[in-house]
Image (cartoon, grey):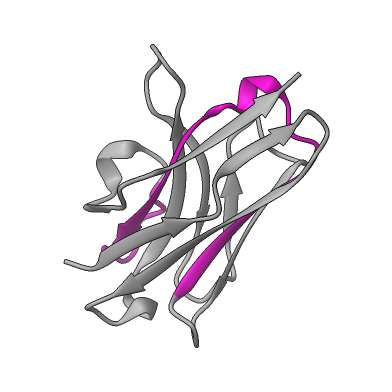
Amino acid sequence: QVQLVEFGGGLVQAGGSLRLSCAASGRTFTNYNMGWFRQAPGKEREFVATIMRRGGSIFYGASVKGRFTISRDNAKNTVYLQMNNLKPEDTAVYYCAADERSGVVPLREADFGSWGQGTRVTVSS
C-alpha cells in the first residue's frame, strides 16, 4: 500500500484560504487516483474531490465545488487541496486517500484503499 501523510491544516477565519498537501510514498504515485474526504464532528465522512492519475479528470463534491481546487504534482508525489472562501461548515478533519484501480472513477469512501491520518481544519466565524 502507498503511505499518505497530510499537511497544512489549521485555524482560519471564515472567508480565508488554506492549502492542504498530501505526500505519498512507497509505491508509484502515478498508479493512483487520489481523493480528499472530510469528516466533521458527529457526521459521516464526506467526499470532497478526486483527481485521476494524470490529472486530466477532476470531480468535486457539491458543497465545495467552485471554492476548492484539487491538483497533483506527480514529480513530487503530492496531491493538494486549495480551499478558498472557507466557511465554518468546512470545519472537519480532512483525509487524503488513494485508489489503485483502473477504469473506475473513485468517488465513495469504499473506493479508496489507502488513507492518511488526517489533518484538522477549523474555520472560525
| Location of residue 68 in the rendering, given as x and y in whole percent from the top left corner | 69, 46
Instruction: Please give left or right for residue 109 compared with residue 8 in the image.
Output: left
Q: Residue at x 42, y 60 (%)?
A: 34
Front residue (pair 17, 49): 17
Q: Residue at x 40, y 63 (%)?
A: 33
| Location of residue 35 in the rendering, given as x and y in whole percent from the top left corner | 44, 52
Name the quarter where the N terminus is drawn.
bottom left
Name the quarter where the C terminus is drawn.
top right
Q: Residue furthest bottom?
A: 75
Q: Which residues are magenta?
A: 78-106
Q: Residue furthest left?
A: 1
24 falls in the magenta region: no
Front residue (pair 5, 66): 5
Q: Quadrant of residue 20?
A: bottom right
Q: Residue furthest top?
A: 42
Above or below — where is 12 with respect to 1?
Answer: above
Q: Residue at x 32, y 76 (%)?
A: 31
Q: Quadrant of residue 91?
A: top right
Above or below — where is 13 with respect to 125?
Answer: below
| Location of residue 66 in the rendering, given as x and y in whole percent from the top left corner | 77, 41
101 falls in the magenta region: yes
Q: Quadrant of residue 37?
A: top left
